[in-house]
Image (cartoon, coloured by chain):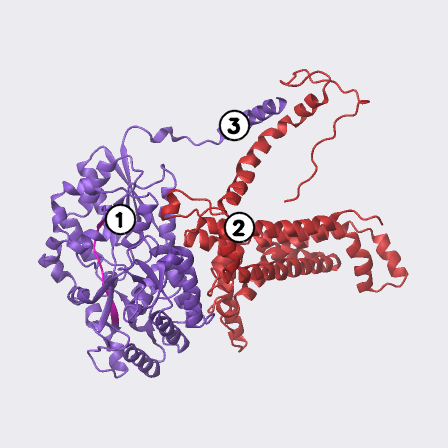
Chain colours: A purple, B red
């Protein structure tokens, strides 16, 4: 066949051209063993970067033939997960160790990105130091453990006592219902027109922060939930969902929140922590326990007076129903890539990163709630940050996000619903209906139920 | 993409051409195929590269749009064939028709109307301008075209931002500007794209206008044709080819504009400026639904193809 000869010739010629621009990987083989560590470094969040720079030195001092290559990914949260997923797409770029959010673990296990750690944990005597609920934070659907938690967190209202005094609001402030919270925000709007009364993260650019710090802190204070653990179905058409969106609509419509344009900036998280709160431009922030990490000496914006100015109040339930307050907990883990060529070495690195002294220093710097008993009881930890006591105290009203591999996709749909409401494109009930359709598309009609 | 009939016609029997000395395999003496083959052999590397880097991704993305490929979850390990699910999902998704509409508005307003009319007007005005004016205006217009896209996008962002140049200028003359990127996102990106792309059209039309023979225009003037009449009956028909070529180029360029919109509004607020490229990016890379994103990209390809066919038909020589 002539055609075949032609094609062969073409291919040969083509290959000669392509060979000219082929890369030369030979330089990397042999010699030193390398470990790549991928983690997020974005805005105020430099704690992981600082932590791994230190652990890298420690690790290389012990393992002289190993080079630890740090890959700080400068991206907002959604983009960080995308970048990680793309890195896993090829064996040559897949990270050996990665900083992984607990809510992504099940999904990434399904994707085949993560290595089960059970055999290593069996031989790790320090695993007993981890609290029981922290141990399962990194579990996959199959019950194996894929991620070792670095710390956990809770969420509540941070408020600026100086601004409250100026606005004539009595302290300490303890809102009992959503309406109390809104009334306080309205008072601030009236008395201090230049100040943003309340910030609740919302919309797609802030990613998971919108879905968790924003939406679920509201939803879990209603009678409804996202997911029914018993029947393992997603709840659609619930009143609580619409009410939560209505709250979002209220604060943006009445101007109690930042302008939608400010809120839809992917740097919003940094702006709140490093600029608005320290400079007295924002009165109330629905935010995380880690927020004070920005203001410590080790943080991006040292603010020595932070503890005198800022106070915390638990997020109230919708109408003050039991238990009266609500919080959400998440946290990040260290996981090992399934494609790693050095699983033993990667495990050694994870162990070193999360031993007692390193966990302690990370939990202090990043203002994390400790997940190791020997850290939580360490006087150095307890005294490190005056806000730890409050945030550890609301653990008994805390909720966890649905632990399913569908959750990340559902979270995206929540962010879409929030954004269409805050920008006035849809009314809360319309946005909720769009969300319901999307959930059905994602999980299938047999895995949804109407609200109880 | 326009497909041209590029195969060289086989040499006629009456043409006696010298046979190449080095006969390629499969080239049989006296057989026309052998000679043709030797002639097109130098094209082979280019064809292979095009196949690898152009056709390959296009075919892959077309295939991918029928799967549930994703960045995470079980579908990331192994994507499955889902048939037309992505497409049916698209057509029931309220964002999609809106996005198609925004894309068409963006292309029509910024490329077909904005860039072409402004480009033609500038080109005609520059012909009658003196040299100083010509070089100043030319430099100003071309600058926007020369800037790398990301730089131009940031410049436009800084210009239209709530505290940006435009509102500051308005403030100086005592007017209140609006929050352009938030209240009128489509207008802002359309104006930015007109600013950025007009130079290209202007240069194409400048070249075309110099080819219009002056004696025809003069004759028309003698016959008493006014300026607008001369434009409609003489100039435009004479540069018809350039017009449709330019239509095609600007349309296809504008259809795939991503950086400009992404930097200025990121498709927001909500989905108010999410044209198809932005929507495809969001679905594939923010939400990890690669299959769904490639389905959107495939639709974009079709829209581009439809425009191309229309313009190619316009290019067909008419019998005058």
Q: Earlier in the sequence, mark 1 or mark 3?
A: 3
Chain bearing tag 2 is B
- Badge 2: residue crowd in 10 Å (few <14, some 14–19, many ≥20): many
CA–CA distance between discs 1 and 3? Answer: 44 Å
The magenta stretch spans residue A149: yes
Name the residue at 57% across, 52% down.
Answer: B300
Residues B251 and A65: in front is: B251
Marks counted in the figure total: 3
Against A169, residue B112 (above or below) is above
| CA–CA distance in space, label 3 to label 2 | 29 Å
Q: Are marks 3 and 2 on the same chain?
A: no
Residue indicated by mark 1: A140
Q: Is residue B298 magenta?
A: no
Asked whether residue B56 appears in the rendered view, the answer is yes
Q: Which numbered circle lies on residue A15?
A: 3
Q: Is residue B171 above or below residue B66?
A: below
Residue named by callout 2 = B297
Residue B42 in percent (x, y) is at 63, 27
Please provide percent x and percent y for residue B212. Answer: 80, 51
Left or right: residue A362 compared with residue B40: left
Give the extent of the magenta segment. A148-158
Chain of the residue under the numbered disc 1 shown in the image: A
Q: Residues within 10 Å of mark 3 (few under 14, many from 20)?
A: some
- Image quarter (top left, top right, bottom left or bottom right) of the N terminus of chain B: top right
Residue B291 at x, y percent in the picture: 46, 48
- Residue A210 figure quarter: bottom left
């Amino acid at each position: 066949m002539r055609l075949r000869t032609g094609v062969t010739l073409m291919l040969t010629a083509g290959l000669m051209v392509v060979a000219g621009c082929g890369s030369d990987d030979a330089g990397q083989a042999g010699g030193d063993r390398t470990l790549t560590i991928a983690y997020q470094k974005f805005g105020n969040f430099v704690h992981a970067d600082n932590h791994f720079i230190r652990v890298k030195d420690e690790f290389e001092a012990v393992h002289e033939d190993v080079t630890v290559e740090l890959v700080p990914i400068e991206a907002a949260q959604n983009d960080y997960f995308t970048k990680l997923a793309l890195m896993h797409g090829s064996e040559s770029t897949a990270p050996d160790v990665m900083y992984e959010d607990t809510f992504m673990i099940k999904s990434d296990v399904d994707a085949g990105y993560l290595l089960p750690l059970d055999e290593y944990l069996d031989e790790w005597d320090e695993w007993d130091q981890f609290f029981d609920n922290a141990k399962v934070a990194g579990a996959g659907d199959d019950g194996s453990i894929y991620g070792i938690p670095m710390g956990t967190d809770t969420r509540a209202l941070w408020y600026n006592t100086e601004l409250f005094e100026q606005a004539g609001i009595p302290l300490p402030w303890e809102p009992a219902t959503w309406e109390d919270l809104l009334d306080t925000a309205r008072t601030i709007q009236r008395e201090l027109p230049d100040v943003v009364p309340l910030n609740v993260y919302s919309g797609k650019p802030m990613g998971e922060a919108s879905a968790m710090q924003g939406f679920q802190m509201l939803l879990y204070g209603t009678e409804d939930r996202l997911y029914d653990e018993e029947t393992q179905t997603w709840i659609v058409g619930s009143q609580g969902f619409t009410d939560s969106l209505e709250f979002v609509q209220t604060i943006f419509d009445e101007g109690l929140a930042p302008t939608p344009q400010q809120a839809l900036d992917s740097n919003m998280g940094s702006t709140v922590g490093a600029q608005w709160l320290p400079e007295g431009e924002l009165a109330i922030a629905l935010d995380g326990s880690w927020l004070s990490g920005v203001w410590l000496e080790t943080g991006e914006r040292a603010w020595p007076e932070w503890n005198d100015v800022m106070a915390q109040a638990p997020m109230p339930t919708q109408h003050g129903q039991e238990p009266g307050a609500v919080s959400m907990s998440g946290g990040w883990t260290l996981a090992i890539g399934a494609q790693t060529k050095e699983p033993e070495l990667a495990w050694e690195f994870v162990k070193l990163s999360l031993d007692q002294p390193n966990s302690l220093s990370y939990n202090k710097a990043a203002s994390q709630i400790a997940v190791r008993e020997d850290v939580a009881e360490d006087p150095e930890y307890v005294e490190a940050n005056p806000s730890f006591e409050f945030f550890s105290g609301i653990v008994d009203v805390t909720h966890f996000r649905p632990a399913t591999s569908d959750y990340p996709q559902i979270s995206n749909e929540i962010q879409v619903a929030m954004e269409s409401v805050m920008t006035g494109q849809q009314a809360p009930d319309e946005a909720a209906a769009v969300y319901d359709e999307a959930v059905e598309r994602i999980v299938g009609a047999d895995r949804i139920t109407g609200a109880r | 993409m326009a497909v041209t009939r590029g195969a060289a016609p086989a040499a006629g029997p009456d043409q006696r051409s010298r046979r190449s000395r080095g006969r390629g395999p499969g080239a049989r003496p006296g057989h026309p195929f052998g000679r043709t083959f030797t002639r097109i052999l130098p094209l082979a590397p280019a064809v292979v590269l095009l196949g690898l880097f152009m056709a390959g991704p296009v075919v892959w993305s077309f295939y991918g749009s029928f799967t549930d490929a994703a960045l995470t979850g079980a579908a990331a390990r192994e994507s499955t064939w889902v048939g037309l699910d992505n497409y049916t999902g698209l057509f029931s998704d309220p964002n999609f028709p809106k996005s198609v509409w925004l894309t068409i508005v963006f292309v029509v307003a910024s490329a077909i109307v904005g860039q072409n009319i402004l480009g033609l007007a500038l080109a005609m005005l520059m012909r009658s301008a003196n040299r100083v004016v010509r070089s100043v205006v030319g430099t100003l217009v071309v600058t926007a075209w020369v800037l790398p896209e990301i730089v131009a996008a940031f410049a436009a962002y800084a210009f239209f931002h709530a505290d940006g140049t435009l509102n500051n200028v308005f403030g100086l003359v005592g007017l209140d500007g609006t929050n352009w990127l938030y209240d009128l996102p489509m207008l802002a990106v359309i104006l930015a794209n007109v600013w950025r792309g007009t130079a290209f059209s202007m240069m194409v039309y400048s070249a075309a206008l110099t080819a219009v023979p002056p004696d025809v225009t003069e004759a028309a003037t003698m016959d008493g044709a006014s300026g607008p009449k001369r434009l409609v009956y003489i100039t435009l028909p004479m540069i018809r080819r350039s017009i449709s070529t330019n239509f095609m180029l600007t349309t296809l360029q504008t259809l795939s504009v991503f950086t400009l919109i992404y930097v200025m509004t990121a498709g927001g607020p909500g989905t108010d400026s999410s044209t198809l490229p932005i929507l495809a990016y969001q679905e594939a890379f923010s939400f990890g639904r690669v299959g769904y994103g490639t389905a959107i990209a495939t639709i974009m390809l079709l829209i581009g193809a439809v425009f191309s066919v229309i313009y190619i038909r316009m290019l067909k020589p008419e019998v005058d």
